[in-house]
Amino acid sequence: MSEPEKKSDGNGEEAAAPAIDFEPKIVAFACTYCSYTAADLAGSMRLSYSTKVRIVKILCTGRIDTISLLKAFEEGADAVYVAGCEIGDCHFLEGNIRGKQVVQYTKKLLAELGIEPERLEFFHIAASDGPKFAEVADEMTQRARRLGPNPIHARAMGIQTPQGGREQAPSGEGEGQTGRQPA
Amino acid sequence: MIVAERKPIEQIQEMIGDFKKVLVVGCGTCVAVCMAGGEKEVEILAEELRLWRKLNGEDGYTYDEVTLTRQCDKEYLEEIRDRIGDYDAVISTACGAGVQFLAEVYEGRLVFPALNTKFIGVAEGAGVWTQRCMACSDCILEWTGGICPMTICPKNLLNGPCGGTNHGKCEVDPDKDCAWTLIYRRLEKLGRLEKFKQIHAPKNYNPMTKPGSYVHAAYQEEGESTDGQ
């Protein structure tokens, strides 16, 4: 995402030339007190943003465990993000700090498996920041389009991913092909 | 407690190769505390293996999970007696002792280690462990003010520092503290510097003979000694 905009156009995603044309599945874990409220506000403000994001409301991002994030990818999510409060504003004091730490750790595990760590992110979204919620939804959808589908999702859609393996994302950490069985 | 670290996923993947049904067996004691092989880590490992197969488009692989209280006691290992036969291979996330015991109790089953066992250590803070003991079987902490030169000193010196001690740092590794400087400072604080002056005989390494064995006095048979002889 380049410029932050208050309102996004159309279905809210920047025009880009995706490598593979597909409908991405994005899962967003949003905390009750801040980011879900921001999502509500985005709705009240009639902001348009990506329709590909499935929002899962949780009490606090401190609830997020590595397993929830891994399972989302196993179920075919192309990108996953966790949206919590700004630092210092967590209703449960430090839940967002824990959530962020879990996301950082899980990114490392994803890299080991050949999944680009950019597909997973943690964002701080204040309850009053409806526009940021919309921006973030668009950004993650954009990332998913740019990186291409999760191979599990691709298979479910009947799409062939390039060469049976994954292209390493430019800024991804770790080895893309590590540990994979030879084709 | 025993501190261990999970092996890189590639090593584990190579171990289990093409086995279709694999059981991941966890341990709920030391390795759970150091976040390497407890119930949560077993859950994550099994999920990583499933993800690996699915990403490759490979079906028909099953990775089941179970976590025992610990794997160094036969009574806990019994829990999986009825189901272990259903699997082609077992991955154990216990320390080296637990892996071996599981393999011994279920002789004939393929058991793979998921962890690298590191040392006996303590938690310095969340997620940070340091070695404190090397199980030398002849503890001298009484006269070193609670600091172990066997563990910290590269030369295992017992009677003060070597000539290479350098402003509290070690000549072997300048980033490491000199054990005997630490001991001196500690004894000074405790007011027991006279202990520092005592000369101790060379260490008897017999008790460290491998593999070690120990029988508690209450369970020794007639004429049997502590080391099972």
Image (spheres, rainbow, N blue to C red):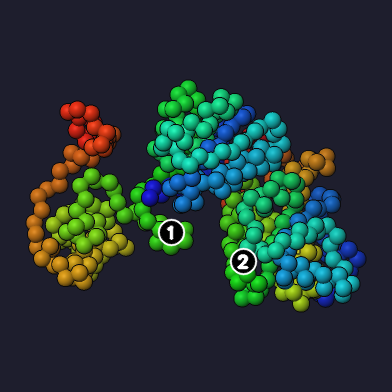
- Give percent across and percent down for residue B215: 26, 35
Q: Residue at x 73, y 67 (%)?
A: A32
Local SS, label 1: strand
Residue B173's mark? none
Q: Are labels 2 and 1 assigned to the same chain? A: no
What chain does mark 1 sit on?
A: B
Give the camera-side residue of B203 and B98: B98
Q: Which residue is mark 2?
A: A95
**Left-right relation of A62 to B194:** right
- Give percent across and percent down for residue B20: 63, 29
Marks 2 and 1 sit apart, C-alpha to C-alpha, by 21 Å
Q: Which residue is mark 1?
A: B128
- Give percent across and percent down for residue B66: 56, 38
**Left-right relation of A93 to B4:** right
Q: Please identify the quadrant where the C terminus of chain B is shown.
A: top left
Res. B166 visible in picture: no
Amino acid type, callout 2 = Gly
Q: Image quarter for residue A89?
A: bottom right
- Give percent across and percent down for residue A160: 79, 40
Give the camera-side residue of B24 and A168: B24
What chain does mark 2 sit on?
A: A
Which residue sits furthest top?
A: B108
Q: In this rendering, is residue B208 above or below A106?
A: above
Q: In this rendering, is residue B49 above or below A124?
A: above
Amino acid type, callout 1 = Val
Q: Residue at x 24, y 65 (%)?
A: B182
Q: In this rendering, is residue A37 above or below B148?
A: below
**Left-right relation of B206 to B67:** left
